[in-house]
């Protein structure tokens, strides 16, 4: 029997939560910045998994589960010339979609805490057209091992 993959469930739930806000895809935002792909909309969201670490907090590691913490970077991207207002509006729409104690992820079993870390706006680099706003979402959950 396969082991339940809580991180994949979190990504799927975030995609469902954020799809009414804008197009959402999982990946590395740097590949978007390097792509000359006309199929990308002017604004969309990239879910970029970040660090994962065990949260032992003085408790021994259990044989059937382990508490973990993952950071999912919700990266808002825009290729509009006047990108700032659009990214602010998209940021607010993400906050609305992820409202609640567990940031809208109540449907994923095992999540014990969720919240946003400090955000980073990034204007386009010289010669580039993509601006970004990174919203790191930190999620603590229990990962079954069986």
Image (tube, rainbow, N blue to C red):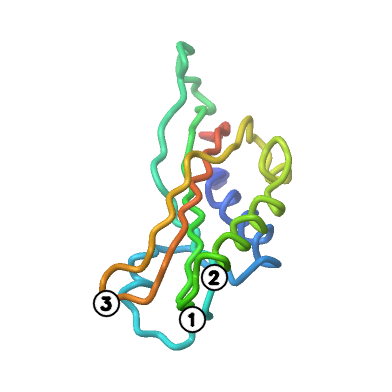
Q: Position of residue 109 (x, y in %)?
A: 68, 39
Task: Report the residue at 70% width, 54% height from top.
Answer: 97
Q: Quadrant of residue 87?
A: bottom right
Foreground label between 3 and 2: 3
Depicted 117 relative to depicted 41: above or below: above
Name the element at disc 1: loop
Q: Farthest left residue? A: 126
**Residue nearer the viewer, 103 or 84:** 84
Q: Position of residue 83 (x, y in %)?
A: 49, 70
Residue at mark 2 = 44
Residue 137 as seen in the image, left or right of residue 30: right
Residue 124 as seen in the image, left or right of residue 42: left
Depicted 69 relative to depicted 129: above or below: above
Foreground label between 3 and 1: 3
Q: Which mark is residue 98?
A: none
Mark 3 Cα-neighbour bin, 10 Å: few <14, some 14–19, many ≥20: few
Q: Which mark is residue 40?
A: 1
Depicted 8 relative to depicted 3: above or below: below
Name the element at disc 2: strand
Mark 2 Cα-neighbour bin, 10 Å: few <14, some 14–19, many ≥20: many
**Do the CB atoms of the residues marked 3 and 1 lie less than 8 Å apart?**
no
**Do the CB atoms of the residues marked 1 and 2 lie less than 8 Å apart?**
yes
Residue at mark 3 = 127
Task: Report the residue at 49% width, 32% height from top.
Answer: 68
Q: Position of residue 112 (x, y in %)?
A: 63, 30
Task: Report the residue at 43% width, 55% height from top.
Answer: 121
């Amino acid at each position: 029997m396969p082991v339940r993959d809580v991180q994949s469930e979190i990504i799927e739930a975030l995609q469902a939560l954020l799809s009414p806000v804008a197009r959402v895809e999982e990946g590395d935002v740097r590949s978007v910045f390097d792509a000359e792909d006309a199929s990308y909309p002017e604004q969309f969201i990239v879910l970029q998994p970040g660090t994962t670490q065990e949260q032992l907090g003085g408790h021994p590691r259990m044989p059937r589960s382990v508490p973990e913490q993952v950071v999912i970077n919700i990266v808002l991207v825009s290729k509009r010339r006047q990108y700032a207002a659009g990214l602010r509006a998209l940021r607010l729409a993400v906050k609305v979609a992820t409202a609640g104690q567990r940031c809208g992820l109540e449907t994923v079993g095992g999540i014990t805490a969720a919240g946003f870390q400090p955000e980073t706006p990034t204007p386009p680099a010289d010669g580039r057209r993509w601006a970004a706003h990174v919203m790191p979402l930190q999620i603590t959950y229990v990962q079954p091992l069986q």
